[in-house]
């Protein structure tokens, strides 16, 4: 094999290689279930309720989100999300959230509402 072909092959092989740090982290939690709670803006002027019904399949999460209060109309409906370690990231329309899972509770920032807000929810049953 000519030297140039070997160098090209090595370059292509190294470009395609993935280090372990690039692989998605395996979820350490299962968020499947029904969740309820509240959201409140950081200035505490606005608040509302949250209902979340999700199913987890590996690192992927799908489900339905219902928010009440001062929220954009496209907020409610089907969501897609991902789990990395104990962190759930989800999105629906202009709304997105990054929630830390702690047993049967989740909490974290939610954007796309009437201002920066925090979402706190608990799992129903288990």
Image (cartoon, grey):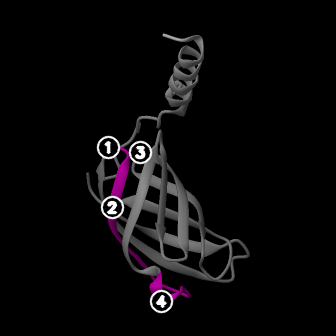
Task: Say which element carries label 1.
Answer: loop
Q: Quadrant of residue 110?
A: bottom right
Discs 4, 1 touching: Cβ within 8 Å = no
Q: Which residue is mark 1?
A: 58
Discs 2, 1 touching: Cβ within 8 Å = no
Q: Report the residue at 59% width, 79% height from top.
A: 113
Discs 4, 2 touching: Cβ within 8 Å = no
Cα distance between the residues tagged 4 and 1? 30 Å
Magenta residues span: 58-74
Name the one closer to the observer, 24 or 17: 17
Q: Which residue is mark 2?
A: 62
What numbered label is drawn on residue 103?
3
What numbered label is drawn on residue 73?
4
> Of marks 4 and 1, which one's residue comes earlier in the chain?
1
Labels 2, 3: front one = 2
- Residue 19: image location, x then y, percent: 53, 25
Q: Is residue 64 above or below residue 80?
A: below
């Amino acid at each position: 094999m000519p030297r140039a072909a070997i160098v090209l092959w090595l370059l292509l092989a190294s470009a395609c290689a993935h280090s372990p740090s690039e692989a998605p982290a395996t979820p350490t939690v299962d968020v499947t279930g029904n969740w309820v709670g509240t959201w409140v803006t950081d200035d505490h002027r606005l608040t509302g309720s949250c209902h979340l019904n999700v199913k987890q399949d590996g690192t992927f999460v799908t489900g339905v989100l219902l928010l009440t209060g001062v929220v954009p109309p496209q907020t409610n409906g089907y969501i897609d999300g991902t789990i990395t370690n104990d962190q759930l990231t989800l999105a629906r329309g202009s709304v997105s959230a990054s929630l830390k899972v702690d047993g049967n509770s989740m909490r974290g920032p939610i954007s796309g509402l009437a201002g920066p807000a925090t979402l706190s929810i608990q799992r129903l049953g288990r």
